[in-house]
Amino acid sequence: MSVMDRLERKMRFLSRFNIMIVLIGAYALGYILSMTAPAVLNYLAFDPPSILKGQVWRLFTFVVSPDSSSFFMALITCFIYFSISRTLEQVVGTFRVNFFMISGILLLDIFGFLFYALFPVPTCYYASMLSPYYLYAMLFVLFALMFPEARFLFMFIFPIKGRWMIFITMGMYLLNIVQAFSHGFSGYAWILIFMVAAAILTLFLFLTFCGYSFKRRNQAAQRFKRMGSPGTSRSGFRTSNTRQSTEGRSASYRHKCEICGRTNITHPELDFRYCSKCYGNHEYCMEHLYTHIHVKSPDDIAGNFQS
């Protein structure tokens, strides 16, 4: 059992809601405040001296910081973040998406205080510009790693495969930092570096704990390739004759988990269910029913992002 599986068993409450919806709501609220009462944002921004004086809400309310002044772009941003988070939720599970976002926010807090400790006044003022922008953008990288063949519309015009979107995203990070240094905004450039470092570290921790998901993703891709081959069913498995011959050589069972291989014969205490979100008929034990990677139709993978 992986570290993430053990964490999920101990913190099941994180699987009962999608934190990305809360963050998108906070983003929308921040945009509304920037248009109607921008002074209020000063009381919500990340400010280490104020936090040390007891204003602990700033550890979390800095996520309302909007990164766009255009209503259209703010609307598109909310839609994209929601779509990607929902797709990732179907792939790796709600708990893992929540873990990614919560750990990213906590790392931003840590890096924000580190920036405040390393840089003197007035440079430390730039700590108030801490925002989850790069953490949200890292969702693109995670999505591209999960679906390297999915295509994004770069600048809403040019279709680019996911594997190239990873390099483009990282290149844009670097370009923003270089531009800040070139204009003499060294404090702003350094806070950008800290935010990017926190986002990359968040991704690294996620991949460390959930790396096995990529192996299962490749197994699902191999099933898709076998769908059109003779002797395979629509779900990617051998047809009934082959299955019957396999069952004849082993103990008869009615239910079997595709992830761990346990059956109702070897583990009669387990419950088994078919997943309604998987393409075809795929059965799992209750331990893996909500944590497995959903098997998608080749036409449905990354549906909203295919050109």
Image (cartoon, helix red, strand yellow):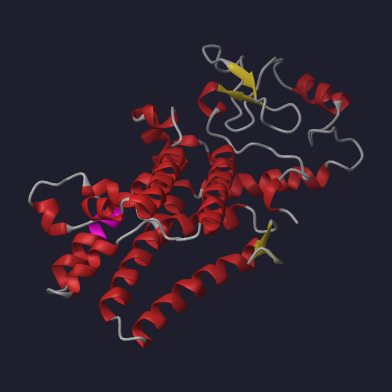
Q: Position of residue 120 (x, y in %)?
A: 12, 74
Which residues are the magenta region?
107-111
Provide residue 247's location: percent of width, then percent of height: 76, 21
The residue positioned 46% from the left and 35% from the top of the image is: 18
Q: Answer with left or right where residue 286 lies relative to residue 209.
A: right
Residue 282 found in image quarter: top right
Residue placed farthest to the front in the image?
36
Viewed as shown, does residue 144 lie left or right of 99? right
Quarter where residue 276 is shown? top right
Q: Is residue 47 above or below residue 222?
A: below
- Quick one: quadrant of the N terminus? top left
Residue 132 visible in the displayed image: yes
Q: Nearer the viewer, residue 166 or 265?
A: 166
**Most foreground residue, 61 or 256:** 61
Image position of 129 with respect to 102: above or below: below
Q: Residue at x 77, y 45 (%)?
A: 298
